[in-house]
Image (cartoon, grey):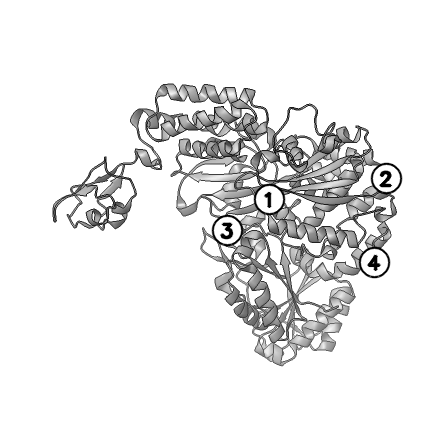
Amino acid sequence: MANYKYHILICGGTGCRASKSGEIVQNFKNILKQENLDNEIQVITTGCFGFCEKGPIVKILPDNTFYTQVKPEDCEEIVKEHFIKGRKVTRLLYTDPEKKEHVSDSKHMNFYKKQMRIALRNCGFINPENIDEYIARDGYAALAKVLEQNDPQATIDIIKKSGLRGRGGGGFPTGLKWEIASKNPADQKYIICNADEGDPGAFMDRSILEGDPHSIIEAMTIGGFCIGATKGLVYIRAEYPLAIQRLQIAIEQAREYGLLGKDLLGSGFDFDLELRYGAGAFVCGEETALIHSMEGQRGEPTFKPPFPAQEGYLKKPSNVNNVETFANIPVIINKGWEWFSSIGTEKSKGTKVFALAGQINNVGLIEVPMGITLREVIFEIGGGIKNGKKFKAVQTGGPSGGCLTEEFLDTPIDYDNLIAAGSMMGSGGMIVMDETSCMPAVARFYLDFTCEESCGKCSPCRVGNKRLCELLDKITSGKGTMEDLENIKNLSQVIKDTALCGLGQTSPNPVLSTISHFWDEYVAHVVDKKCPAGQCKALKQYIIDPEKCKGCTACARNCPVGAIKGTVKNPHEINQELCIKCGTCQAKCKFGAISVQ
Amino acid sequence: MDKIKSLADLKKKRDAIQGSLNLRENGDNSESMIQIKVAMATCGIAAGAKQVMETLIEQCSSKKIDAVVTQTGCMGYCYAEPTVEITKPGQDPIVFGHVSVEKAKELVEKYILNNEMVEGIIPQNYQSIDK
């Protein structure tokens, strides 16, 4: 075996691949060969590093050099400078946005300092297409331990005591779920992995499957053993081709090693996995709808009970867990429940992966201990708001969650605190909004999504959300009345109380939370017919300041609808009825005479 | 490919391949490791630093020493190339000059493993700015 001096880790997640990380890998391999260094330096494609904002990421070990936004043509310089001459390529290093200094290695980056990676432990570290690297990191050791003990209840007890709760959003205790499923006798049971991840802006499940697929296989096998299921099914959306490909490779490799199939590790326990593809419907994240979709039926939820643990896939007891939940299992078994339950808050143990998105400097995937504050996440790890703007709100829990304002910045994040604050954990999407976001428009955006994704089975969701969306349309177009606001509140409450499944029951959340936190903004739309954030097109007015206007005619010449009138060297005027609020005039004015009101 | 049929098989497999990931694991925990830096500027390479670095990597892995071996640029002691800086956790770095392949082996054997001082220390005559 060659003694490598350096390892080059290149992110092979979907984001970085889209910006040519595949080509970077090839370039490195070619150049190293030319320079006769291919026996000294190993090139490895890994899963996501989480720092998607600055991809593609190239990390060099053992010195932890963290190169960002690397282009395929930069490879030669990295090889010649870093490896041959021993000098870091400064221009590719990460620059601290506040200090404007280059950060030489990942240990000094704020982005990583506060993170604690359990579910993402192998992402950005191992080659997900190589089972050996997973085994070298204690992979399948938890499975071996569980099988050797041969006591499913003991393992369930470990998971129960660890305090692990479902990471898909509901936060149901995982150990308890397994226990219920294990106690229902049947000739065949199923363990199901929910990899449907429909929450817009969340991509942790995809990244785990892409970066560490074996951890899911191992955890599902353990879960199968605990509840007495010999078959596992992964319900994954077809829009995740890379995750599917890596999972398939991983399943093949596990079978070759005998870690899937008959008589695992000589224990007599048989287990195998199959993939089921979903068409990417939000409602199929709900477990009953997911099961129906896997059975080949319409992805519609049904009333619970019966719970899947009683009557699930093909009417057999089934247990559904989310990808991130599974990713925690092997670590809990290897390191013990005491270790896991020492992390986090009283009722929410362990860590949570969040997908940071929106108006934030460091867009990416992070894993933090429960109980961290939003301020630490947004301002320390996330690097603050883009372009020095002011923080306004953060939407957690996606379309089912709510928005949290400045007053919650110091609240420790866990399942219960977020619910108490009027939002929810959800799958961990975190969309940060700055002062230029219009809250009624944000609420309308999410509602539009739920209307689109509603399966149509129950009328509160099908009709109620549609009407709610129409009412919000009225508000954002300046036609709303105070009575509409009351109706919005009432209707939201009715939908929450009467919808069949989680999708409908939570869909009015963004509306209710924005109404309670930003009531003034709604009133401004209704009474003053103004959008304080200046986002609602219908309420915008472009106005020319006659003092500043020099009469250069640039605006009038460029207006696509001829709404600006005026003569040369005299102040111009905009006809508000004709104006389509495209903003061209403002962009063309050289004197800053046109403002939005 | 051989099947893994028992816990013992799995452990055997893990031990056999763990070494290949050591470099990455060590990079992750570099504070708690012995750090060895080999000056690899033109002067160092011309004096044989490459072979010295290879020897150090080889010695550390065969003797199972938790150490991170990296290369750096010119340390300025061009008269004493190849130069090697060794930092044990919690101790000040020590720079050794005129490190041949033989000397490298001696450094590992005596200084790193037995904590004995070895001749050839270059007195530190600079202050580093990140302290």
| Quadrant where the image shows the N terminus of chain A | bottom right
Please indicate whether residue A43 sits to the left or right of residue A157 in the image: left
| Within-10-Å neighbours for mark 3: few <14, some 14–19, many 20+ | some
Instruction: State the mark number for residue A150.
Output: 2
Disc 1 chain ID = A
State whether residue A41 is above or below residue A99.
Answer: below
Residue that mark 3 sits on: A53
Looking at the picture, do discs 3 and 1 lie on one chain?
Answer: yes
Distance CA(mark 2)–CA(mark 3):
45 Å
SS assignment at label 4: loop
Q: Nearer the viewer, mark 4 or mark 1?
A: 4
Disc 4 chain ID = B
Q: Position of residue A23 (x, y in %)?
A: 56, 63
| Within-10-Å neighbours for mark 4: few <14, some 14–19, many 20+ | few
Q: Does the CB distance between marks 4 and 3 fall below 8 Å?
A: no
- The disc labelled 4 sits on which kind of residue? Asp
| Within-10-Å neighbours for mark 2: few <14, some 14–19, many 20+ | some
